[in-house]
Amino acid sequence: MEEANPVTVWKAYLVLIMIITPGHLEVSGFTTTNEDYPEMYDAALPNFATLGQHYDSAIGSTLVLPCKLNLTTFHENFNLVWKKDEAVLTAGPMKLTMNPRISLVKNKGGTNSKENSYNLEIQDIKIIDTGKYICQLSSIKPREVIHSVQVLVPPKIVEYHPSDSSIEVKKGASFELECRGSGTPPPRIIWMSKQNILLNGQPEHESERLFIESATRNHMGTYTCSADNNVSPPASKDFEVFVLFAPEVEVEHEIIYTGLGREVTLVCKVYAQPPATVHWFKDTIQQVTTDRHIQEQRGNRNFLNVRIMTDKDLGNYTCQASNGIGKERKSIIITGSPERCLINSRPRGPSKHEYNITWSTMSFSPIIEYYLYFRENYSVRTAVQDDMNDNFVDERLQYRGLPFLPSSYRTPDGWIRLTLGVPDENRFHPNNHHERKDYRAMDSLYTSSYMLRGLQPSAHYEAKVEARNMHGWSESTPVFYFTTASEDSHLELSAQPAISKNADGETNRAQKLSFSALIVMLFYFVSTLVEYLVKDMLF
């Protein structure tokens, strides 16, 4: 076979290129190119000046998708085509889709079909607009920019349990609330309650399901299921929970101190579901509303107001609440006796053998007398001290500076009880100078004190006080602990050692001894030096 002439082959290739290169085809009113540029012209092909992006757009909004070519010598020879997924929407300046919400929006410039960019506008966005939008260059080797559109859908609660938004549960039983939502992106479901702290002590709980293992009255109230995906508006659903339980009664004050002729208000709080019926009793007699006894209810607070106290009004009162599940009662005592005394002395006394103990109390009737109890606190003494003081109480009564007290002043547990009257100077009427939160300005404060003598130094003591007025005795104070001063407590520290007046001779003697010691040391040093010099001269 005869080999082809190289010149002939080259000419054949050139003709073929000339046939393929200049061809153009008109389709549906817009021009698309069949040209495939050689590699040497690739740099001249237009590129996109727009990058593909992701767009989140809310329903009903308007979105503009950009598509722009770089300006080149050849860009006018190409058209831009918009597609949604595989469907062609536009070609060059021509709109092909019948969707009235979609249109082309030119960049700056006129409506010339040879502009280098076309933007696609979507109005009144709907869920069906979600997808990929492709801006494609009409070349043999297509170049394209892809935008993705996510249509945001506001959250919606689509399922919930219980269906009637209300639930009743007995105390101690479990209950469950459930809530499911829809939307784009999928919403977060959050449970909240204005009345309660939710699981693990947190104010909110993120889950479709809220489970309470054991219901109490504190779980009663409104629970809100909220669906939120950051697309406005959020959705919510309220659930009302009723916990059925027997009444629970609380009183504000178990004991109320007052005086004759005063006004007193008793308060008890009642929690119950279903709501309870409340009755007031004095001892076993049910109270009814009169001019002096007025009953009232505000929410869960129940009041019994006694306008003018008499002797007959003092005593034990009961607040009783009942419903179909059960009943409960709590007592309140109204007394005219003094309040418990308050000992306000310092716990460490300045004296070795004496201690001044001071106390005060509130009383609406004059104080008649006090009981002062005291004893040494044996629990802090050493075993040696215990052995040496087996008859400590008797010794203290007989010769430690206290007046002689018969055995009737001693209690079986070792307390010494002193009965003290009330001098006029120890009574204090504060008028407007004393304010007490629980009572009115007519209150009276009584103060008193007593000097205990004949005590041991460095000893630990206990004390307590009771007060009596015409209505009876107060409760005893908590045990008060105090300590006497030590034997050497009168000594004071000084910058220089103290020198006794009778020690002058000893001081002079010490000074003389110190001077003599100095002379001896000096003599020893001189003799040593002389001995060293002599040896040096001889040798």
Image (tube, grey):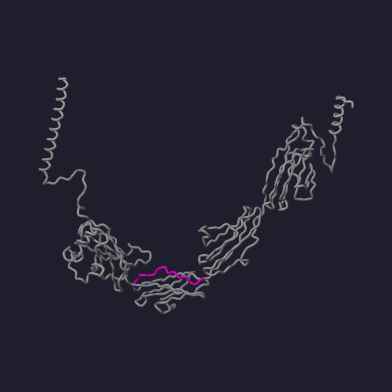
Tell me: residue 193, above or below residue 38: below
Tell me: residue 204, above or below residue 403: above
Going by the image, does 475 lie left or right of 196?
left
Quarter holding the N terminus?
Answer: top right
Q: Tell me where residue 315 appears, x and y as whole percent.
A: 36, 75
Is 356 one of the magenta-colored residues? Answer: no
Snapshot quadrant of residue 313: bottom left
Q: Tell me where residue 145 appears, x and y as whole percent.
A: 72, 41
Question: Of 182 and 212, which appears nearest the observer?
Answer: 212
Quarter holding the C terminus?
Answer: top left
Residue 42 can be seen in this image: yes
Q: Tell me where residue 62 appears, x and y as whole percent.
A: 70, 49
Is 246 one of the magenta-colored residues? Answer: yes
Residue at the right extreme of this rendering: 1
Going by the image, does 196 lie left or right of 21?
left
**Is most of the magenta stretch helix, strand or loop?**
strand
Residue at the bottom extreme of this rendering: 285
Q: Tell me where residue 511 appears, x and y as whole percent.
A: 13, 38
Tell me: residue 123, above or below residue 292: above
The residue segment tinted magenta is 245-259
Residue 420 can be seen in this image: no
